[in-house]
Amino acid sequence: MDKLIYTAMSGAKSVFERQAAMAHNMANATSTGYRAEEHLLRAVPVVSAALPTRTFVVDASVMSNFTPGPLQQTGRPLDVAVQGQGWIALAMPDGTEAYTRNGSLEVSVNGVLQTRSGIPVQGGGGPISIPPDNEITVGKDGLISLKPVSGAQNTVTQIGTVKLVNPQEHELVRGADGLFRLSDGGAAEVDPNVQIAPGFLEGSNVNIVEEMVSMISLARQFELQTKLLSTAEQNDRAAAQLLTTR
């Protein structure tokens, strides 16, 4: 009885949390460069001499699906998509680095290359500044070249390189802002093998059909857990009646 109650109770709670994660995934099915979130559950016995029968279901790990999403051609010069494995480094306001697959970039009013949310892109020596009145070209290796829109238009100037990294997946943690960081808070090394596709954006890797099927399955699991709690209550009531009649 005791084991049934605690297993069903913690199981229902964990299923509810997985449903919330899947709802978040489906809400980001069209978000550029989004990585689906996955939860793994397992049973854990409570070590106790007094109540050794109690077993909880816990969220063993929260993982991210790092499978690359589909590439979508935009033709926009400041749209870049990482091909295969790798990340675009961002210079955070607190001096640390964060990593994203969302390569929809723009130039701020101050001439700084940044994401749509206003976070500067990390270059070789910090944020990258773009002089005005220039045509911007981003190479496959992240090299940024400028060509004047007036004057000597045959002059090409290289001003910096987008920092591209490829740390181990197990070293990355997702932040509340949706960006990834190294678990030790450090900065990843530049990986020359990482390449980007200019004029493309990477779509979300969320499979909406699989998420919907999983949501239906979780709803049934949640219903089963609540039925088990109801059964435990009925058994407890029946046992109390037997004891009372005696």
Image: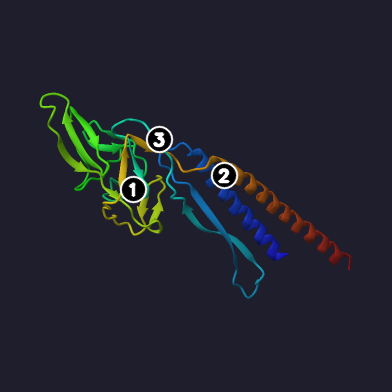
Question: Which numbered tag is attached to residue 87?
Answer: 1
Can you identify the residue that label 3 sits on? 72
Q: Answer with mark 3 or mark 2, whichever residue precedes in sequence.
A: 3
Identify the image quadrant of residue 198: top left
Q: Position of residue 64 (x, y in %)?
A: 46, 51
Q: In the image shown, does 222 or 210 lie closer to the viewer?
A: 210
Q: Which of 55/122 is in front?
A: 122
Q: Secondary structure at mark 1?
A: strand
**Camera-side residue of 160 and 239:** 160
User: Vertically, is 144 above or below 45?
Assistant: above
Q: Which residue is mark 2?
A: 210
Distance between the Cα atoms at labels 1 and 3?
A: 17 Å
Q: Earlier in the sequence, mark 2 or mark 1?
A: 1
Q: Nearer the viewer, mark 1 or mark 3?
A: 3
Tell me the amino acid under the disc marked 3. Gln
Q: Residues within 10 Å of mark 3 (few under 14, many from 20)?
A: few
Q: Quadrant of residue 177?
A: top left
Q: Position of residue 197 (x, y in %)?
A: 32, 40
What's the residue type where badge 2 is placed? Glu
Nearest to the observer: residue 199 or residue 20 = 199
